[in-house]
Amino acid sequence: MEYGLVALWLALYLLLAYVGATVASLLFPRFADRGVAFGLPVALVVLWLVTYVVGRLSLSAGVWLGLLALVVAAVAAAKRRDPVDGRAYAEVAAVFSAAFLFVVWIRAVDPAIAPLAGEKFLDFGLLQSLLRADSLPPEDMWFAGEPVAYYYGGHLLAAILTRLTGTAGQYAYNLALAGFYATMVTAAYGLAGAVAAERGVSRRLAGGIGAFAAGIASNLTTPIRALFLLLPDSLAASVAGGFGYELRGLAAGWTEFHYWDASRVIEDDPADFATYTPASAHSINEFPLFSWLNGDMHAHMMGTGVLLLAAALCFSYYRTPAGERRRRLALLFGALPAVAGFMAVTNTWSFPSVAGLAFVTVALAPADPGTLLPDSLGDLFPADGPTHEAGRIVAALGVAAGVLALGLLWSLPFWLGAASGREVAVLPDRTGLAELVAVHGLFVLPFALYLYAQVGRTLGTSRARLAGLGFLAAVALGALLDIAAVGLVGPLLVGAWLFARSPTLPRSTEVGPTLADGGERSVGFETVLLAAGAGLVILVEFVFVKENVGRMNTVFKTYMQVWVLWAAAAGPVLAWLVTRWRPDGETRRRLVRGGTTAVVALLLCSTAVYGVLALSNHTAGDDPPTLDGRAYLDEAHPGEAEAIRWLDRLDGRPTIVSAAPAGYRWTPSEGRGASAPSSLTGIPTVAGWYHEAQYRNDTVYDARVADVETIYTGEPARQRELLAQYDVQYVYEGPAERARYGEITVQRLDGVEPVHRSGEVVIYRVNRTTLPDS
């Protein structure tokens, strides 16, 4: 086990978090801890932005100038603010360290960067490409000679940290993965705690619940399957049959549990999946613990901590008085667009979500958005009247458009180069009610109870009961009309919006379980997070990005955002329900508080069942722990292990040619090499994984695949021409190439000579000076 590297990376993260906390104090002056929990994401965004801009000329210079910019910003901030609170920093450092070491442990017992069940070859290949690159954008390791056509911002951040620590890529992959997880968990802890503190609710309790929901909790599928397992067999089969489901996975027996099942709940029409079998025709509904157990270092994971930073910036705006116009403008049009620019290159799916957060925040914040304008334009947004709410929404839309426009400027090189276009489509197959409850129930249930409690507090028990019946009727009607998301989540969105815009509703004097939390406002920023997540859930039921896998990626990449935003909201909501729901009368108070505590405890404990089972299975092996992501090669692919290491030791970015794979499997006997030589080294190959057909188009990809086959088996004249055209310096001949192409003839050319032999691989060097002209 590489304990020295673990200590080095943890020390770097904590140092960046401290320096970043100094800068964060300027952005979050009204937070109880002045935003210490967001010190690391602030530092990482500053470091990344400078590297991304300067990296167009020199990546190395960009990294060191980014570090210099961060230090200068911290020194300047320290002159304007008091030093970082030591106790607050120690608390945040403890949360981060625990989360970081948790994933280090997970990865140490399963460190393999393997192609099956995920995108690890894509993610590691991008990291390795960036470590080899001199400038941005990096050369595509699966499409030699062209820049990468994928959002690579998170991989760039991992490469920056790798360069600063001098770590080899196969170790850096797993250490960076742990850092992204810990950043998300710490940000959820900080945001949930800050929102709760504004309401007078325990900051640590809310923060702990938020961190648990973000990093440990699962959706409800595992506890539901466990319930079926506990029922008598006949009753379980009857109930499952009534809902049209068969008992499988954990529901069929404890030994049948598989961590994968909980991430494939929502079924889509198999006709949308041209390349998938009906058994795999599911949308992906990951949650963080599954994602990090699976071990990809993918875009939807790496952006989570910074998405919560964007939410925290919105909360800072939410808390800023109307009179501080310059600060509010700086947050909206200075800090948020910079975060949006980071998001555009890291996880493009989250780019519009930053603007969406800005929209909801400005529309629901206590300060009127009209006060953002000069006094001379104040009449455009009258303080009262029927047009007031419409004016707030128009202003919020304008702010969101401004955040998008400025975010585009920050990330402009990405849009002009690497970004690949996709068609937006409407009206996909929608999600069923049972699927929605299984996936989002952890949050929907307490949010519904919270809004019910708020109705009781402000309008009285009888109206709360009517609201509850109305919610159930909306759920039933939505399911009947095949718009289950509208019926389930729509009332939560409307309720959150109405309460957020009615902060001074009179308290009810009706006897009953009314609430009294002692504050003037009925709700706080948790309703902004609730509304933002609800809007995303409803959106993907009607709009999706059209690909050859239906709306799978749209649900996949959007639901992760919903999860982390709702996790941060769940912290203050659940903490408030447990500690501040106070009905009149001692007996009722005890019953309500005891019942609420029991429900919350049951909800949290049940969503921890997945982690207990998954981690038990995950750590069942007896291999010695290591963070070397390529250590498995010696056992799994001994015939190619040494050849891949030899390639990795080459300097620069020499172009190689290897078999173009057709799937996620590395099975050489079937001609599937999974682009292992390039994916595991970052050295570009002429035509790699078939994802390139999605990134570019089928025509150009198929042409390269045909050229690769010609290089291996074609006529000598054409072989020489193509070797020169693609500037090929090495030809890789391994078991996948022989299985796919049969008799390989390229080595017969003058100027193509063997330079490495090991196991089942021969690598040939192409000597352009002796290769005859065609």
Image (cartoon, rainbow, N blue to C red):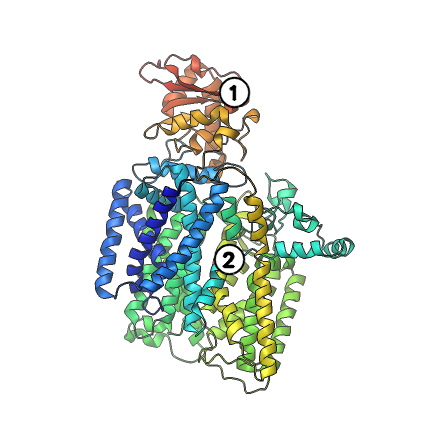
Quickly name the residue at label 1: 738
State the separation of the CA atoms marked 1 and 2: 46 Å
Quarter occupied by the N terminus:
top left
Is residue 687 visible to us here?
Answer: no
Residue in the picture at 35% in, 51% down: 13
Choose between 368 and 614: the one closer to the eye. 614
Name the image quarter holding residue 678: top left
Residue in the picture at 40% in, 55% down: 96
**Residue furthest right as drawn:** 234
Quickly name the residue at label 2: 563
Q: Position of residue 511 (x, y in %)?
A: 59, 86
Choose between 1 and 456: the one closer to the eye. 1
Tell me the kind of residue under disc 2: Trp
> Badges 1 and 2: C-beta atoms under 8 Å apart?
no
Rendered position, 750 above or below 604: above
Is residue 382 visible to us here?
Answer: yes
State the SS at label 1: helix
Query: How many circles with numbers are drawn on the protein?
Result: 2
Q: Position of residue 419 (x, y in %)?
A: 40, 44
Residue in the picture at 32% in, 70% down: 372
Tell me the kind of residue under disc 1: Arg
State the SS at label 2: helix
